Image (cartoon, helix red, strand yellow):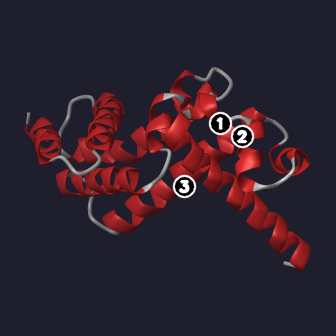
Amino acid sequence: MNLREESAARTRAALVESGLRLAERVGLAGVSVNVLVGELGVSKGAFFHHFGSRTNYLLALYREFQERLQADIDAAIGDIAPGRERLLTGTYAYLDTCLRNRGVKALLLEVRADPLIADEVNARHAANAALTEPDFDALGWQHPAAGARLWGGLVAEAALLELEAGRRQSSVRDALRRFLRS
């Protein structure tokens, strides 16, 4: 990678990080191109060069968040066999990553309502459910695909409860463990 490419990559990464910080303060609706470039001190041209549109930018924010989540989950579960332990370990990694990252609440709540990126969100939810389906199968669930899809919604709600509190909530995590016993 040459110096120009390195500089472009740094600018793109800075735009994403700035957007995550801004989303934390003002939600996705408040993440305007003008505010974003003003905060970062880059031109609108730089923004549009990297993303092309605000919708593409929101997709980039969502994808970055999802990549961070998946990397943390993969590292946590390692080679744990499918089942309860792997499912809970991955779930706790998800919750902890949500607490560590900026702008997560906006990405969990608001991105679902944006019709321009709804297909991406739905595809990601389906992919995440496919990753946890073997856990529900190992647990002997009669409908593991449905259980996995519902688990994703339950865990997202748990993340919102912890984000609202600003810290881990033992009652929320205990409730998740208990759901798996029923």
The residue to which callout 2 is attached is 35
Counting residues from the start of the chain, the first of labels 3 and 1 encountered is 1
The spot of residue 180 in percent (x, y) is 14, 40
Residue 67, located in which quarter of the rendered image? bottom right
Above or below residue 115? Residue 33 is: below
Between 176 and 141, the one nearer to me in the picture:
176
Q: How far apart are marks 3 and 2 (CA)?
A: 25 Å
The residue to which callout 3 is attached is 67
Between circles 3 and 1, the one closer to the viewer is 1
**Quarter of the figure with the C terminus:** top left
Counting residues from the start of the chain, the first of labels 3 and 2 encountered is 2
Between circles 2 and 1, the one closer to the viewer is 2
Q: Distance between the residues labelled 3 and 1?
A: 21 Å
Q: How far apart are marks 2 and 1 (CA)?
A: 7 Å
The residue to which callout 1 is attached is 31
Question: Of the residues shown, which amino acid type is indicated by label 2?
Answer: Val
Q: What residue is at 75 percent from the left and 67 percent from the top?
A: 10
Question: Of the residues shown, which amino acid type is indicated by label 1?
Answer: Val
